[in-house]
Structures are given as C-alpha cells and as structure tokens.
Amino acid sequence: MYKILRYSFYDLIRSKWCYIYFGFYFILSSSLLFLNNSLAKSIITLMNVIVVLTPLIGSIFGAMYYYSSKEFVELLLAQPIKRNTVFLGQYIGLSLSLSVSLLLGLSIPFIVYGMLISPEITNFISVIIIGVLLTFIFTAISYYIALSNDDNIKGIGIAILFWLFMAVIYDGIFLICLLTLKEYPLENFSLFSILINPIDLSRILIILKLDISALLGYTGAVFQGFFGRKMGILIIGSVLMLWTIIPIIMINIKSKRKDF
Amino acid sequence: MLSITNLNKSFGKLEVLQGININIVKQGIFAILGPNGSGKTTLIKTILGLVIPDFGSITINDKEIINRWAYRSEISYLPQIANFPSNLTVIEIINLIKNIRPNTKLDKDLIDLFNIKESMNKKLVDLSGGTKQKVNIVLTFMSDSPIIILDEPTAGLDPISLIKLKDLLIREKEKGKTIIVTSHIMSFIEEISHDIFFLLDGKIFFNGTIEDLKVRTNESTLERAIANLLK
C-alpha cells in the first residue's frame, strides 16, 4: 500500500491545485492575522472557515481524483497486488497531500506571527487536527461516492450535494425541527442530530476546546450540559474517528465487488 | 496453461459473456477478435481479475484464479487506453511498476528499442498519444511474465514503432510465452497470430487457425473472412 500511497502523494503534491489550495490558506491566515491583530481572534475566525471549507475541498478532490485516475487504477489492478491496497493507497495519498497544503498554508503565517511562544498554540493545533480529520472524512466519503457511480458528473454532483447537505441544509432542517417541536423535550434528539453530522461535531469540538460558551449555541450547550467539557471532547473525538473509519470500510467492501 | 470454463458475465440485463470456453495449452500468439461490444475487453478483464464473473471458472496452470491476486505476477497487461497520472515523469511510472513487480529487468532494452530515452524525465501529461502508448508497451513487456495480454496494442503507433512491436511480439513468442491480443487491425493479426477466437454477442463463434477460417469462408484475407462470418 505504501508504494501506491507514495506515487499518489508525489503526483498530487506537484499538481497546481495543491499549490492553489496552499496559497488560499496562506493568504487567508495572513489576512486574518493582519485584520484581527490577535492570535486568539484569528483562530476563532479560522475555525469557522475550516469546518466548512475543508469538507468542500475534500469532497471535490476525492471524486475528481478517482475519475481522473480511473484508467491508471485499471492498470494497477492488473498488477500482482490486492485490490484494497490500490484504493486505500490512493485515498490516503490524496488526503495526506490535501492535509499538507492545509497544514503549511495555515501554519507558516501563524508561526511568523509568533504562535510558537504563545499559549494559543494548543488551540491552533486543535483547529489543524479538526481540519485534517474533516479532510480525511470527506475525501473518503466522496471517494466512495465516486467508486459507486461510473458517471463522473453524477458522482461529483452527489459528493457536492452531500457536502451542501451537511454544511448548510442540515442546520436548516435541524432548526425547523427544533421550532416545530419546541413543546417537547428535545435534548436527546439534538444530541443524536449532532452526532450524525461531522461538520457540526467538529464545530462543537473546537468551541468546547476553546472554551467559548458564547459561541456554543443550543446544541453545543446541551452537549456540554449532558457530557461535561472533557467527556464531550472525548466523545466527539471518538465519533469523528468512526466517521473516518466507516467510509474507509465502505470503500473496501465496494472495491472488492466492483467491475472495472 | 490457461483454461476458461463456462464463463458468464452480465451487466444488468446485458449478457456480455455467455458460456465462454477457452483452453490454451501451448505457447503462441492467440487473437481474440469480434465486432464492437462482442465482449472481448470483458473477457480479457475477467482473466485479469478486473471484472468478477457471475459464474464459471478460470484456471492458470491448473490453479483457480477468481478472487485471487498473486497469480497476476504471471501476467503482463497492456490496457486499451494509456492514461497515466499527469504529474509523474516517465521514469517514475516505470519505477512504480518495477516496485510492484520485483522481477522486472528488461526496461532499459525496451526504452532503447522504442527510442523514449529523451522522454524519461518528462511529465506524462506532456507526452503525445503515440509516446504514451510506447511507455505503455515498455511497462507491459519489461517484466518477463509467461502470459502477456494486449488490448489494442497498435493504437497511436507510427509505422516504425509498429514494426518494432511486431518483432518484439514474435521474439516473445519464441521465448515460449503465451500472448493474447485483441485488435481491429486484421492485417496486424494476420501477420503475428496463428490461432483466433472469434467472439460474437458474448459467445465464441469460431475457434481455430486463420487458415481454417479462410478455407471455411472461401476468402483470401482474414479481413474478408471475418466480414463473411458476420454476414
């Protein structure tokens, strides 16, 4: 698997999209630091951008990369290696190269600003970890979607719709449910609803970590009230890991049965 | 050597392969022919494990291969479309395949033969279609496998490279290899191959030597004999 991972990583790290992605984060974090003139404030703004943007990029790249390397995958599958090695190698190579762009693009301006000697460093690291986790989760989901749909327009479309649903529509539906059912106790319902959306989960995790009650919102407050801060962070972390592992297992199952 | 028994595959309602039986016991160059959509590529892909058959069996040297993978070290494959990761260089792609297939030694000779030395450090995205196909051929032949499967190997090649490919195929055959090739260029097949399997609607419609087919259809060339079969 390492051989495939390495080739995918080298292929992608040299693609112009990786540089554009890196450049975007570099400019974003530089301008945030310049405008806020405070590490703490910049990290909070960064969080709001990261939880929406990394899933979008993961979704688009996961599907696009699968389709663009389809013929080469056929050649690899005809070699004496197991099927799941090819797909896992490609998936991890892709997620890693996106994560490297994210990491470098965000870290360089923050380090130059003096983050390493500031107490904010642990908060910054949590934002980066969440960004990387969301990249791995959404890349896996969109890679799986692409693997399940031979038509690339359809596959990329479904991957973007999935992102749109999780990032935007989900919150709307959730809010409507809360409003219409406000007569009933909604704690369990809200807890469950957060657990099935990795974007909401990540947002709450970072807010719990940064300890900013004002940004928690209803669901976050319920979450903190129910589990407490430390337990809450632990539970969200575990659920996010599940969100990464389940799509990878699905990629594995799908790739075993698929005809190429 | 290679034995296929009652192989069936459908994609939805479309039955692409229906009860295919093939038994290849000797070395040589075997052509799989047939009109578009007759199931040639699907048949090749089931041998390679890219397509999983609905039922039937495929054995190589008396070992069942369906849902296995290690047997593929015995097979080299040239796919129909040469499409490589665009940001890698030719040498990197050759090294990748060499890494996966440990007994690969012939790359240098083939790079010289097909004159792609100058392209070795170029990115694959910058290569012409013909040069890509040459890289594809080098990747296929550089590992010394006893079975070689070629899907439309002539695509995009200039006349000089085509002659080199024919010579290469004949040399490999003389080394005692089993080569399975599909092509729509009948003159190419007639020049290199002796035995053919003619597929029609997922079944083997004719199996025998080119001479047999010409006698049976009373035609002088393979192209006309095939056209006669399809009437």
Image (cartoon, grey):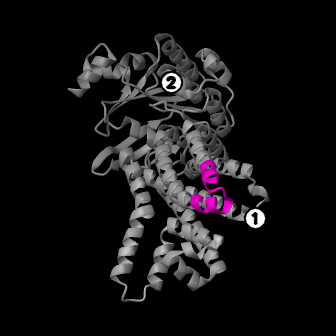
Label 2 SS: helix
The residue located at (67%, 59%) in the rendering is: A38
Under mark 2, the amino acid is: Gln
**Residue A19 higher or lower than B66, as above or below:** above
Q: Chain of mark 2?
A: B
**Residue A28 higher or lower than A213, as above or below:** above
Residue receiving disc 1: A119
* Residue B133, disc: 2
Extent of the magenta region? A29-46
From the viewer's side, name the closer residue of A185 and B108.
A185
Image quadrant holding the C terminus of chain B, namely top left
Quarter-wise, where is residue B136 in the image? top right
Is residue B135 in sight in this rendering? yes
Instruction: Locate residue B227, reporting x and y percent.
Output: 25, 22
B109 left or right of A240 in image: right
Quarter-wise, where is residue A226 in the image? bottom right
The residue located at (51%, 73%) in the rendering is: A195
From the viewer's side, name the closer residue of A114 and B201.
A114
